[in-house]
Image: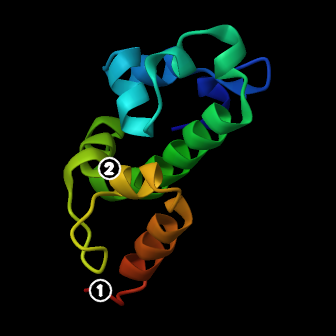
Amino acid sequence: MVLAAYTDHGQFAPRKIAAVLRTTSDELARSLGLGKDAVQRKERIASDRTQRRLRQMVEILNKVETRFGSPLLAYAWYRSEPLSGFDNRTAMQLVHENRADDVLRYVDAVDAGVYA
């Protein structure tokens, strides 16, 4: 995912991200652990919390996209693949818990062969 392709006026644009991931804005909001207003209402989209969650998800998807070959498969992994060492919670569940940095470190460790 090229970051500039998913932004409008210097902010992440939920509709653009949802279009690439072939999902709805409601599903995107659930994937971020936010209410649907957070990705639909202009003032809520601009909030620090919404922008932070969008950034975290995009960063995670960018890291794993090379492994899976497409943003769609990376998104499926994000939503459904249990991660060892995190009580089998998914990356999505960890983002909901404000643990995106743990997911990024996990991906780096897997890439380095730690969990191979």
Identify the disc placed on residue 115.
Answer: 1
Quadrant containing the C terminus is: bottom left
Above or below for 70 versus 20: below
Kind of residue at badge 1: Tyr
Instruction: Say which of 108 and 47 sits in front.
Output: 47
Mark 2 or mark 1: name the one nearer the start of the chain. 2
Residue 41: image quadrant is top right
Instruction: Say which of 47 and 14 sits in front.
Output: 47
The answer to whether any part of residue 21 appears in the image is no
Kind of residue at badge 2: Tyr
At which x and y percent is residue 99? 50, 62
Q: What residue is rendered at 34% in x and 15% in y?
A: 24
At which x and y percent is residue 13? 61, 20
The answer to whether any part of residue 109 appears in the image is yes
Above or below for 106 versus 44: below
Instruction: Say which of 75 and 67 sits in front.
Output: 75
Residue on which the image places disc 2: 78
Q: What residue is rendered at 41% in x and 16% in y?
A: 25
Q: What residue is rendered at 32% in x and 49% in y?
A: 78
